[in-house]
Image (spheres, rainbow, N blue to C red):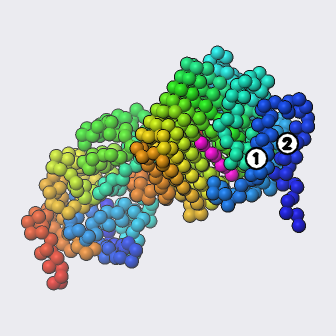
Amino acid sequence: MLTISNLQASIGSKEILKGINLEVKPGEVHAIMGPNGSGKSTLASVLAGREDYDVTGGSVLFEGKDLLEMAPENRAAEGIFLAFQYPVEIPGVSTTNFLKTAMNEIRKYRGQDPLDAVQFLKLMKEKMKLVNIDQSLLSRSLNEGFSGGEKKRNEIFQMAMLEPKLAILDETDSGLDIDALRIVAEGVNQLRSPERATIVVTHYQRLLDYIVPDYVHVLYKGRIVKSGPKELAFELEEKGYDWIKAEVETV
Amino acid sequence: MNNQPNNDLKSRLLADFRTSEERMNGASKSALHQIRREALNQFDRLGFPTVKHEEWKYTNVNSLIKEVFEFNAPSAITLEDLAQLESSQLNGNVLYFVNGQYQPQLSKIVSPADQLSITTLAEAVKNTPDLLNQYFAKYADFQDNAFTALNTAFASEGVVIHVPAHTTVEAPTILRFISDARQMNVASQPRNLFIVDQNAEVKVAESFRTLGDQASFTNVVTEIVVAEDARMEYYKIQNESDMAYHIGTTQVYQQDRSHFYSATVTLDGGFIRNNLNIALDGSNCEAHMYGLYFPNGRQHIDNHTLVDHRKPNSHSNELYKGILEDRSTGVFNGKIFVRQDAQKTNAYQSCKNVVLSNDATMNTKPQLEIFADDVKCSHGTTTGKLNEEALFYLQSRGIPKTEAQSLLMFAFAEDVIKKIKIDPLREQLERRIQAKLAR
């Protein structure tokens, strides 16, 4: 589904990703872990198409198509979703209104008819239950004055609505208490299916108690320095990142 | 050697005044005409402002005074011509003026006469001279403003609205001023007077439009008196051509416990200067001022506002927003004046701008002059580019960049537009903003 080969990216003159290789197949959940500043969020942003980064080398194929050539909106329409670490507040644009526009733009890209108001509301009601989000929140300006938990739930709600093939969760656990974390994780788990894949970017292991990964990768200094099964996450939790750093430095 | 060319706009206007005076015979002795003559003399003394004048620093009227205009030119406007302006269909009083002249055949007045007295200025001069003597030119100061002096000197047509005490006028009133510049350069100087008596309530909109590609010049002055406990909603809407010059002053005088709400929306116009001056000469008054300007091309839009808190316990609130494209320029100058007597004043001012092009310029100047010690005042201006984070967020959900930009800009503008309480007018503006954003 997703093939990242030797991906390199920089911001200004600073090189952040120094050759990432990663293969994600349908149905899989990959966790990307690593200390602060290792390039985790950069990887998520580059995949979603944020313009602040210059891709200086390598390639990313999504279902055989060159992802890096696509505008962010086309990546979304192809089925990629990024749950933001810091969802943006947008005054004057309600979640409902914006999401209806987004869904119908994606449907247009795919050659499907737009949803009418009734179909949209029905779908919305169904997905609201998934993340336990309130209607009144969705009528308000997008994320404006939302608590940290509400913002993250809104991200997962949008993900549920858009039903992406590949979801990238960027530090979705940051700033969440344990109850909010559980709700968010349940939302993600309910969307798991053999056709869909998820990349979970996180600093801590605790989110992985709820969203159990198939693979864990450790990103350090812009490279994936270690990959393993879910047990690798426990090891990191227990021992921290220092042993990985030491291992890398000696090589 | 010709330092004082006698063919410039000022000389021509002075000559026009004398010619018209000669034709007046006895009427030139009237009190009204004495005011006109005084205003003309003042205009003569002041002359047109240059950029050396602090209030005109960013708005250079040089190209305006080089144009030659036909004042109050005749127009053969038809209903088909009007249809192409796609104006909102309003269930209310609609008065049309073309090149400054009233068009009774296009106008309709639906409010009963005991609810609302609405006449043209020309009629008011004949029928209600006492009302004019009491209010006309008592508020819009022509001592310092050459354009107000000029308008006052030539004041002959416009609208006089009088809402009697304790009357709520249900139907909105819209005054449509059209410059028909299809054949030649045209100019007009509408003069309006709105008196909202004690505990009365009314909604009035002024709309300015252009037909044709020749130059037009509108120099409008509106005086508004909002008496004790009265409430007024006032909207000024401008959709003029790139060849249009517009200088306007709205002078508001508020008495105890009166409320005044205004929205000034300028979607198009070549060269625009709006002055909105509010004198809060009463306690427990409220004044709310909203503004939206959206210039593109080489359009220039200047909004000057002045709130003069003269008495205690009043509240003023101001929000102006601008979207600037291409090589356009915008000016916001907001002055808040709190006099020594005006204790417990609350005055807020905010001006927010989004500049969508590197070649567009926005000049903002908030000015607070506070002479009372127990007041709450704040002001803030921001000028920046479109929020790139918000844009990326919307794009990452599948919304194409241009649509995302429109969505963000529309939300930005809607903040002001939603304040307009005449529904068809607001809806029409929303459509026009969407259309301008989609270009």
Q: Chain of mark 2?
A: B
Is B70 on the left or on the right of A125, as rendered?
A: right
Q: Closer to us: mark 2 or mark 1?
A: 1
Q: Nearer the viewer, residue B145 or B38?
A: B38
Residue at horizontal 85 percent and vertical 37 percent from the top: B74
Is residue A50 in the magenta section? no
Residue at horizontal 83 percent and vertical 47 percent from the top: B13
Q: Is residue A77 visible?
A: no
A227 to A149, vertically: above or below: below
Q: Which residue is tagged 2?
A: B17
A186 to A246, vertically: above or below: above
B106 to B336, vertically: above or below: above
Most common secondary structure along the magenta stretch: strand
Q: Which residues are magenta?
A: B271-277
Instruction: Determine which quarter of the picture holds residue B124.
Output: top right
B244 to B87, vertically: above or below: below
Instruction: Determine which quarter of the picture holds residue A38.
Output: bottom left
Mark 2: amino acid: Phe
Residue B42's label in the rendered image is: 1
Is residue B274 in the magenta section? yes
- Secondary structure of the residue carrying tag 1 is helix
Q: Position of residue B275 (x, y in %)?
A: 62, 45
Q: Nearer the viewer, residue A154 or B223?
A: B223
Is A229 on the left or on the right of A69, as rendered?
A: left
* CA separation in Å, label 2 and label 1: 13 Å
Q: Position of residue B399 (x, y in %)?
A: 45, 51
Viewport quadrant of the N terminus of chain B: bottom right
